[in-house]
Amino acid sequence: MDTGSGRTGRGATRALRALGLAAALGLWELAGRGAGDALLAPPSRVAPEYLRLLLEGTMLAELAGSLRQMLVGFLLACLVGLPAGVAMGRSRALDALLHPWVGMFVVTSVASLVPLFIVVLGTGFAFRAAVVFVAAVWYVLLTAYHGARGVDPRWLEVGRAFAAGRVRLFRCVLLPALYPYLVTGARLGLVHAIRAMVVAEMFIIVGYGGLVYNTGLLVSTGPLLALLATLGLVSLAATRALRWAGRVLAPWYEERLPLA
Amino acid sequence: MSHLAAGAAALRRRGTPGAADPGAAGAARVSRFLSLLSVAGGLAVWEGLARELPRAILAPPSAVAWRLAEGLVAGELPAAFGRALAHLALGYALAVAAGVPLGLLMGRSGRAFHLLDPVVAAVYAVPPVAFVPFLVIWFGLFFPARVALVFLMCVFEILLTVAAGARDVDPGLVEVGRSFGARGARLARMVLVPAMLPFLFAGLRVGLVRAVNAMITAELFLAAVNLGGLMKASASRFDTAGLLAVIATLSAFGLLAQEGLKAVEARALPWRLRR
């Protein structure tokens, strides 16, 4: 993926990015000073709040608790979605059977499902895991599906020409070809899992989402923006980690992001 | 495979009517049949299971259909839906107005991309619902806040998809245009814009689905009016049929909107072959 041609070298890219970030922070500072803490706390006010929240411990404790519950739903989504997606991609019949349901569910808003899930599952662990699962599984599934469908048939031909059996073909040809899609699917799923976690928690005011809701009721927006910043950092770190895992698993493969 | 090669292949195929592969047509028919069977089967299983369970756990499709019919006849459901469309339309329009130009800028100019990307990525990383308390402080609990949430939830999708598309314009196409003497505005009109249109439409489509999601999210997390109000009322009565009726309406609308945009795209870009 070419982001700017050979004219802007690595160093220039970094400089531009730093400049952009600095300019944004500067604008934020000015706007914050003008609007006041109650509307938009500037970075100079958010930073000390951030440190205070960090040291106080509630923010991290709630974050850990929420992420743990989110991970259960997410891992379940991967365990179900990845094999199902690959199976759908390789089998026309399965694709025809499951695709209408997948298509219907992927456009359904997670928020619209929350009241239903509360009525059916209550507001405990099952509810939170279920919301995350239902939000993430379709994206994991569809990405794996596109990957499985797009496997170059010539590679399978070569494998068969070398008398590879079904299991061998799967392990040595199909799976390595799928790695980038599986990792991308997990990454997309994780983004939606985190989003669903926040939706579920803010609705019933528990966990990190509940913390954000309650902090939003305070007079100053400083703590609120600090909490949002943490959320953003967690999201970025998680996607970075998965991208790194992808590179480690399949270093020969330049990662391609399929357009959903 | 480039658009040109795909288009040429499609033209060649279309050019010989009756030479369509009969095997492929048969397979497509079987697929459609299986899909219908799956939907019918799924609904039947749901109906059977739900009849055994109390209504409060899960209403059967028949009850949901009945509730939908009731809502339509009473006019309550369409009215709520119509009112909800207001903040959907405005929020989406604003997101398109902001996202498309910025996306094009970021896609075509490497410098603009590197300058803006850190901020865009940082704000995009935060789950939009988390911004709700912030939006309440700025815009209150009603219409302006709903519009703002819809805007926030779809602008980044649109921006990033358009930017990705604008960035990946096949340089071969640009070369061909230039070699025929096209420059500046001519180049933009005859080569760049048509090449970017598919990604533009992809961005619009993704944004629209997100906007429909945002429409109901806004009515559940801000003041519960229209559809959100109906849902909260149903939830408090443990009325899963009512909840499912609204969910079904929203999903159907989302699918229709998506298909609608695909149809517009097919009309506007007849040369584009879609898998």
Image (cartoon, coloured by chain):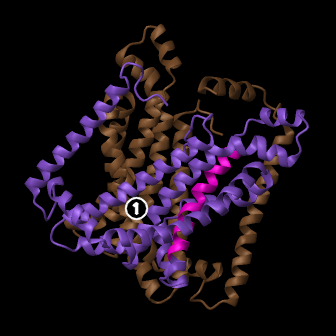
Chain colours: A purple, B brown
Residues rendered magenta in the picture: A128-148
| Marked residue chain, label 1 | B
Q: Is residue B87 above or below residue A21?
A: below
* Residue that appears at 70% across and 80% down: B47
The residue singled out by tag 1 in the image is B214
From where the camera sits, is residue B216 visible? Answer: yes
Q: How many marks?
A: 1
Mark 1, Cα crowd under 10 Å, few <14 / some 14-19 / many 20+, is many
Query: Which residue is the extreme one toward the left?
Result: A34
Q: Position of residue B72 (x, y in %)?
A: 50, 75
Q: Position of residue B94 (x, y in %)?
A: 31, 49
Q: Is residue A30 above or below residue B274?
A: below
Q: Is residue A80 magenta?
A: no
- Examine the residues drawn in magenta and state their main secondary structure: helix
Amino acid, disc 1: Ala
Image-based side of A16 in relation to A153, left or right? left
Image-based side of B161 in relation to A247, left or right? left
Q: Nearer the viewer, residue B72 or B222?
A: B222
Q: Is residue B224 above or below residue A33?
A: below
Q: Position of residue A85 (x, y in %)?
A: 68, 54
